[in-house]
Every structure is written in structure tokens, then in C-alpha cells.
Image: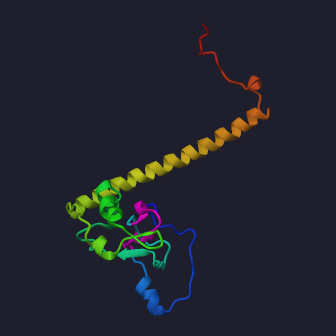
Amino acid sequence: MDGKVSGQDLKWCELTEKEVESLALEPGDVLFIRTNGVRGRVGTCAVYCGQPERALFASYLVRARLNAKELDPSFFQYFTATAAGLAQLGGQASPAADGKFNVNTKTIDSVLVPLPKPDEQKRIATILQTIDRKISVHERKRAALSDLFQTLLHQLMTAQIRVDKLDIDTSDISLL
């Protein structure tokens, strides 16, 4: 989940209208990983922001609807990713007979969260979202530069590009 709800790799199923109503997500819903083979992944969460539309949650997740007037969902999600939040959620995961780990609603309900004023929560979440967007931009730039480097390296190694024929101005470099 990595802190984000993704519209990739969607699953489809036939459900009654009553089942759809009970599983429907609303913007601001917090989704927790209920079951996983890795203890550290259990209890991690993401906030549903309305995309993909008409989304439902699966049985390996727990949905929480917070009182957004008291606790901003994004602020809460960022808190759960801290060492203190992870210790409370993943640290409380119980092992199952199949080798996986589980958290339940009781564990989630017992999480102790710092509670700054709502406007401060929003400011904190907004700052962290901005940082996340900047990190994402830099990761994409790094990937593009890495691809370019690999392409140029391949062209150099296969003699598609010759170094001695490059037009590089070296007039500002002094020789010893």
C-alpha cells in the first residue's frame, strides 16, 4: 500500500447492492493492512482520496472512518508511519496459524495519537505531502537519468558513440 491507494491492479467481483454499501469507501477513509506475512507491513495504512471512484475495500484490510473535525486522516496516516505508530500497530500484531500476522479493530482503536489542534494537523500533513511530492519528482528524475546513463554507456561500449569524435569545449580546462 505504501501510504497510497492505487488504482492499478484492480479486482472485480459481483456483489449485491447491500454488500456494495457495506464495503464502499468514502474520501477520508483510512485503510489498514489487516493480514500480511511480514509483521512490519501489518497495520500500515493509507487514506482513500476518492480515486478510483466507487472503490470497495477487501477483507485483508480494515476500514476506519475518523471524525475529521478532531483527527485529520492524512495526519493520522503520517503518524502511523512513525516509529511510535508502527510500534503500536505492527508491534501488537498477533501471529496466525498460517504464518501470517494480524491486527484487529481493537488494536487499531487502542492506538495513542498525539492530537494537535485540527488546523495544525492539516498544516503538518500538507507539509509532509509536499515533501512526498518532491521526493517523487526527484525519484523520477533519478530513474530517467539512470536510464540515460545506461543507454549512453551501452552506446559507448558498442562503439555507437566514439569519445574522440565528441564536440566538447575544453578551453576552460587548464593542463598541468
Quarter-of-image position of residue 19 = bottom left
Residue 52, given in percent of the width and then of the height, sits at 50, 73
Query: In the rendered structure, does residue 176 fall within the stretch colored magenta?
Result: no
Q: Is residue 61 left or right of residue 140?
A: left
Q: Is residue 61 left or right of residue 77?
A: right
Residue in front for this viewpoint, 88 or 129: 88
Q: Is residue 69 left or right of residue 136?
A: left
The residue drawn where x is 64% and y is 44% is: 147
The residue drawn where x is 77% and y is 28% is: 162
The residue drawn where x is 35% and y is 58% is: 81
Quarter-of-image position of residue 115 = bottom left
- The residues colored magenta run 27-42
Residue 165, given in percent of the width and then of the height, sits at 77, 25
Residue 43, given in percent of the width and then of the height, sits at 38, 66
Residue in front for this viewpoint, 135 or 64: 64
Is residue 152 depicted above or below 130 in this figure?
above
Residue in front for this viewpoint, 150 or 133: 150
Is residue 96 depicted above or below 118 in this figure?
below
Quarter-of-image position of residue 72 = bottom left
The residue drawn where x is 34% and y is 57% is: 126
Residue 48, given in percent of the width and then of the height, sits at 42, 70
Q: Is residue 55 left or right of residue 44?
A: right
Please say which color scheme the image uses: rainbow
Q: How many marks?
A: 0
Considering the image in quadrants, where does the C terminus appear? top right
Query: In the rendered structure, does residue 41 fall within the stretch colored magenta?
Result: yes
Q: Residue furthest top?
A: 176
Is residue 6 depicted above or below 149 in this figure?
below
